[in-house]
Image (spheres, helix red, strand yellow):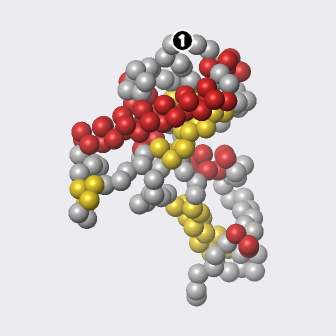
Amino acid sequence: KPLPRVPVLRVFGHSSAGQSACIHIHGMMPFFYSEVKLPDGQDPRDLDEHGRASFIQAFASGLEHAMGLQQNAVGFFGGWRNGGPMSNAFVHDIRWVSDWETVYGFGNQEATAFVQIWATLPKHVPVLAQLLLQGAVLSTVFQPYEVHLPYLLHFLDTFKLGGMRTLNIKTSSALVRGD
């Protein structure tokens, strides 16, 4: 679905020439992980590519549907705007992950299968995780991970950045606004 709003990160600093800069980073969506449990009790590690794709499709549809119902119930989203129904997407992407290690660098994750869930906005992450814990998706309780980590910390960890470190940007991928 086309997204009416996307998160934008702003990084402040200066160029190597000493010019002040405010970098707007687009395309970094907030995410968290969830343990995969199949409703029939089958071991998710035994699924082939088709089985994984089918699970992800059903999981994404269920999560999107549950989030839509929840948001309509509390009145934040839904209804009509500009003469037509609102088009909301809460889940941007879901990916099967292997060899996942927590941001803390520990855990035996080989014993379980995981999916990485990319939300469209940071404020959706805790609600999506709560819906998984409540069993609102596929009538199964899923255990989410790394929901407590702030969106900016995930960005820093994903790109192996730390505070006050140099951020190198390819000039070919940057768009410079007018003075």
Mark 1: give few (<14), some (14-19) or many (20+) Cα within 10 Å.
few
In this rendering, the answer to whether 111 lies above or below 86 is above
Position of the C terminus by quadrant: bottom right
Indicate the position of residue 77 as horizontal and vertical percent values.
29, 49
Using the rendered view, name the quadrant where residue 67 is placed: top left
Disc 1 target residue: 41
Drawn side of residue 145 relative to residue 135, left or right:
right
In this rendering, the answer to whether 12 lies above or below 86 is below
Indicate the position of residue 2 as horizontal and vertical percent values.
45, 58
Amino acid type of the residue that numbered disc 1 sits on in the rendered structure: Gly
Drawn side of residue 119 relative to residue 46, left or right:
left
Using the rendered view, name the quadrant where residue 21 is placed: bottom right
Residue drawn at the location 26% of the way across and 59% of the way down? 84
- Secondary structure beneath label 1: loop
Furthest residue in direction front, as rendered:
50
Indicate the position of residue 150 as horizontal and vertical percent values.
52, 45
In this rendering, the answer to whether 118 lies above or below 141 is below
Indicate the position of residue 175 as horizontal and vertical percent values.
64, 75
The answer to which of 5 and 45 lies nearer the viewer is 45
Residue 105 seen anywhere in this rendered image of the structure: yes
